[in-house]
Amino acid sequence: MSLTITEKIFKKHCQVKNISPGNFIEADIDLIMVHEQLGGRINKEYEKLGIDYVWDPNKIFFILDHWVPAPTINAARMHQDCIKFAEKYNFVHNMGINKGICHQVLPELGFSRPGMLIVGSDSHTTTYGAFNCLSTGIGATDVSVVFATGKLWFLVPESIKVELTGRLNKGVMSKDFILTMIGEISTKGALYKALEFHGTGSSWLSIDSRMTIANMVVEAGAKFGIFLPDEKLKLWLRNRTSQTYEFVKPDEKAEYENDLNYDLSSITPVVAKPSNPGNLASIEEVQGEEIDQAFLGSCTNGRMEDLRIAARILKGKKIHPKTRLIITPASREIFMNAMAEGLIEIFLNAGAVVTHSTCGACIGGHLGVLGPDERCISSTNRNFIGRMGDPTSEIFLASPATVAASALKGKISDPREVL
Amino acid sequence: MENIEGTIYILGDDINTDDIVPSYTLTMRDPNEMTKHVLEFIDPDFTQKIAQRSIIIGGYNFGTGSSREEAVNVFKILGIKAIIAKSFSRIYFRNLINNGIAAIKCDWDEALFSDGDQVKISIENGIIFNKSKNLNIQYKKLPQFLKEILESGGILNQLKQKLQSN
């Protein structure tokens, strides 16, 4: 029987012989990622089970990233609760507050490898699909089930094949592609589905670019967003892990519910207007809209290639005097690499605020919260009402290039004009 | 499993977890305090309006967004027993069932439900009886093992029983 990547990985993780979409299975989990939810709801749920162990403390990746360093007493208390739990159950991989954002740090440290089944207490756990593994977000009760048993039930999803051809043009980023796709298929366009990214266009994309796409598939409702493996991935992993792994490719005759085709060379800069990630508009439709803040960072777009393109746009220039530019590298490693390359200096000279790596601004938590009626162009993944602050504030989602170009001009701007 | 009866409250499409639990409330230590802010950006009087209701009717993609289970817990605190929607975001669907709240996927229009209708849901038979309109509405029944989770009052109750019997 011919299988998709999703079906193959599930098959390796359960006792069921014939895997097909629509089946409910119980699968063995290779790794679980938890962040502040540990002290938010997971600890309260886990107590209900009345057990004094977790199934495998070595398969839990624990990091504090949403509110770091703690901006409020309540956040500090939440961290205390998290740490108490991690100590009580002898967690092995405790990342603390200084490594960065979960979805960047976990792959950097080689924890996501081809063929793995990973779950996390965060909806953007789909990011690890860039590394040819199955990964998805779950809530606190499901985390508790995994902590206790190492297993979780899944509905095997139908897969959608996304065939990418062509190369992105100058000033156009993978963020423009994924926003375009979500706009076209809508925020419910891939509900419960696995998106499988194929094609020559996909192998042209850097690992950073693939992570952005896999990160945002959840905004189209997808359960997984998984890339075919290639040499580029092998090279990336060589520097990150000494563990062995096997690439997972779909069978030639694997069955897909649907085929989507995108020529990346035809993608142009776009934004998602408030207040839905599927509210697509071309840069031409929105350019000139005034902004109060530009934000560059998050698990979606705070990586080296994002910072590099922003630095190319900002080098030797000053941002618009009425606009704030806040830059949050996605991890400490990225922060240090950006320093070594001189990017941080470029940002500071341009008038940006560069912050410690955190989810802060993206969730309206700290380090970039929006006030009433403020407008922000942001490289993040969600522009829901009140997401980054006051409910009357507005968020336009865009690529790092568009964010940097807009910060320069004080209004939404086409990055192709400043590159 | 027992039928679920109550008065319905209607919400729209794409109700997201930031709507249900705004991010700034996530660090609040008292879940009851957090519950005061449910859907406040959409309707500041929501918690008062929902006080006598126990069933929510939603549109497409209900619960889209974050995995934050607070967005289910607050409805539990408000006494919600079931959410009927045209479709659910996958994490939210799991979180509802896992917490013992019935998640019912059912395509509907204004002819079937009006705000404030009295309904009775038979999880066993996959039928919603709209008492106010005297209508029987069928939906695709939940798989047996999900019904069992609901019947146990949530997945952790079920798991606890299993762990104790082993």
Image (spheres, coloured by chain):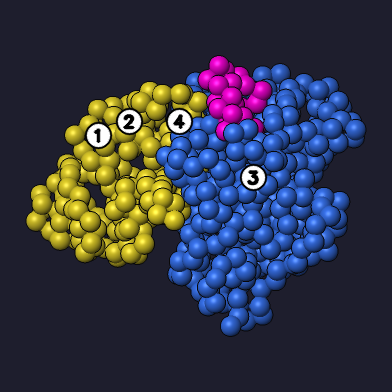
Chain colours: A blue, B yellow
| Residue B41 position within the rendered picture, expressed as x and y whole percent measured from the top left | 39, 30
Residue A75 drawn in magenta: yes
| Residue A91 position within the rendered picture, expressed as x and y whole percent measured from the top left | 65, 39
In this orientation, does residue A325 appear?
A: yes
Residue wearing tag 4: B22
Q: Earlier in the sequence, mark 4 or mark 1?
A: 4
Q: Residues within 10 Å of mark 1 (few under 14, many from 20)?
A: some
The chain to which mark 1 is attached is B
Q: What type is the residue that disc 2 sits on? A: Asp
Residue A322 drawn in magenta: no
3 or 2: mark nearer the eye: 3
Residue at x 60%, y 65% (from the top left corner): A13
Residue wearing tag 3: A57
Residue wearing tag 2: B43
The span from disc 3 to disc 2 (Cα, nearest Å) is: 43 Å
Q: Are marks 3 and 1 on the same chain?
A: no
